[in-house]
Amino acid sequence: MQKEKIHNQDLPQLYRFCFLMLGDSGKALEVFEAILHEASLRAAQGELPKDRLWLFSDARYRCLEAAEGELQAEPVDLEQHEIASNAPAQIAQLDPAQLAIWISAAPEPQRSALAFFYLDEFDYEELLALTELKTAELARLIGNARQQFQAWLDATIPLES
């Protein structure tokens, strides 16, 4: 019987996901360590799931649980801008904490969709599985959020003429 292992490249992405979901490095580290502890216990018992998505799915639920009881974002109509061709340059100027705070302030399930999307780690089918959303809903959430994020970027890091 071949045992599945956690790949080293998944670990930084796992922490990054927790940070994007929670917007707080201390809380993200707590959740990350709890997941690794659980994974090591499962591995010792030969019960590590073969699908690597379980790690990120578990992280999502733990992050949602960790954020429970805190102020939750309410759905509001935010300004939206078309995605700018220089958006990657604007994003490169952000401190990573700014992106995490922006994503962690989004209402669920948009927060999960954005955190997984901005990891740039998963294909569309994996995003659907991890977020437990239908195709149209995932597309709508990500599309609206990207335009809202562009509006925020434009206000935070104005386009240079």
Image (spheres, rainbow, N blue to C red):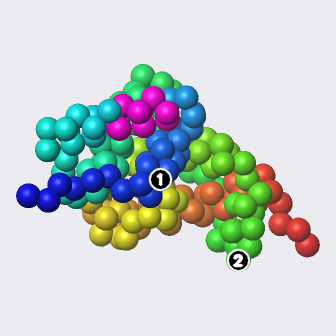
**The C terminus lies in quadrant:** bottom right
Q: Would residue 110 be counted in the magenta stretch? A: no
Residue type indicated by callout 2 = Ser
Q: Main secondary structure of the magenta part?
A: helix
In the picture of the structure, the residue carrying the numbered disc 2 is 85
The residue stretch that appears in magenta: 28-36
Q: Could you say which is closer to the camera, residue 16 or residue 88?
A: 16
Could you say which quadrant of the image residue 68 lies in?
top left
Q: Name the residue under label 1.
A: 13
Kindly tell me whether residue 146 is visible in this rendering. Answer: yes
Q: Along the line of sight, which residue is nearer the eye, 156 or 96?
A: 96
Number of numbered markers: 2
Element marked by disc 2: loop
Give me the residue at 14% from left, 59% from top.
Answer: 2
Q: Which residue lies furthest to the left in this view?
A: 1
- In the rendering, at what x and y percent does residue 82 appear? 65, 71
Of label 1 and label 2, which has the lower sequence position?
A: 1
Q: Is residue 116 visible?
A: no
Residue 137 horizontal/vertical position (percent): 35, 62
- 83, above or below 138, in the image: below
Residue at horizontal 72 percent and vertical 48 percent from the top: 95
Residue type pointed to by label 1: Gln
Q: Residue at x 70, y 77 (%)?
A: 85
Give percent across and percent down for residue 8.
42, 54
Q: Are marks 1 and 2 in contact (CB under 8 Å)?
A: no
